[in-house]
Image (tube, grey):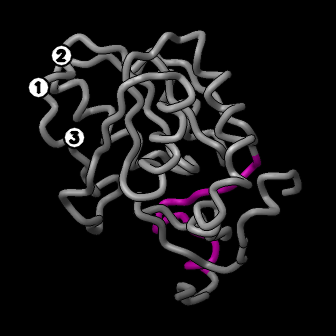
Amino acid sequence: MSGGLMSLLGARRGHFRFESGHHGELWLDLDLLLRRPARLLPYVRELAALLAPYEPEVICGPLTGGAFVASMVAAELDARFCFSERVAAPGAALYSARYEVPDGSWLVGARVAIVDDAINAGSAVGSSAASLQALGARSVALGALLVLGDSAAALADSLGAGLESVERAGNSLWSPDSCPACAAGVPLTS
């Protein structure tokens, strides 16, 4: 994984369990992206330009990192902003973490782009989309600075939404019962 955006974050290899419940071998320190907003701004502007044709009225981002990026994109597009927050922690089942948009009555009928710093399995973005739909909003696009693997494309297709990203990289995810590291007895990396 190379590219300008990758130089702004740290990557580690190992055996990790993600919020979605999946296992994988790549961990990204996404908080590093947010420490120097001026360095992030060119990528945010690029993502905003990619999302502009969808004509979103609202940009929504899951707390924490996604909400910061979404707020910056909303400013670039002069759109309204909202966030989703985790209300249920991940359990043993895949995609058990839940995100909800608080006080979303004003979102009825709104065209929303859901923006995250990175989308891997898509648990935060997918749960945010479900909350928005329950509020009567329509997800027209998913956007991220970085999309890893194929899960985001499948999620966007299931929502009938577009998918835009500044950078993409291949990545493998496994359910715990099909994880090759688990099968080899490799402990989870802390």
Tell me if 96 is positioned left or right of 94 in this view.
left
Disc 1 marks a residue whose amino acid type is Ser
| Residue drawn at the location 58% of the way across and 16% of the way down | 52
Identified at 59% across, 40% down, the residue is 144
Label 3 CA crowd tier, 10 Å (few <14, some 14–19, many 20+): many
Circle 3 SS class: loop
Name the disc covering residue 105, or none.
1
Q: Give residue 158's position: percent from left, percent from top.
A: 43, 23
Q: Residues within 10 Å of mark 2 (few under 14, many from 20)?
A: some
Q: Which mark is residue 108?
A: 2
Q: Secondary structure at mark 1?
A: helix
Residue 129 screen position, x and y as percent: 33, 32
Q: In this rendering, is residue 143 above or below 13? A: above
Label 2, secondary structure: give it. Answer: loop
Contact (Cβ within 8 Å) of mark 2 with mark 1: yes
> Could you tell whether 140 is left or right of 108 in the image?
right
> Nearest the camera: 153 or 41?
41
**Residue at 56%, 40% in the rendered image:** 151
Badge 1 density bin: few <14, some 14–19, many ≥20, Cα 10 Å = few
Specify the amino acid type for callout 2: Val
Q: Is residue 176 magenta?
A: yes
The tag on residue 150 is none
Query: Which is more N-terminal, label 2 or label 3?
Result: 3
Q: Which residues are magenta?
A: 169-183
Q: How far across and how far down the image is residue 101, in percent?
A: 22, 40
Picture disc at residue 101: 3
Query: Considering depth in this image, is 20 or 135 the residue closer to the camera?
Result: 135
Q: Amino acid at mark 3?
A: Val
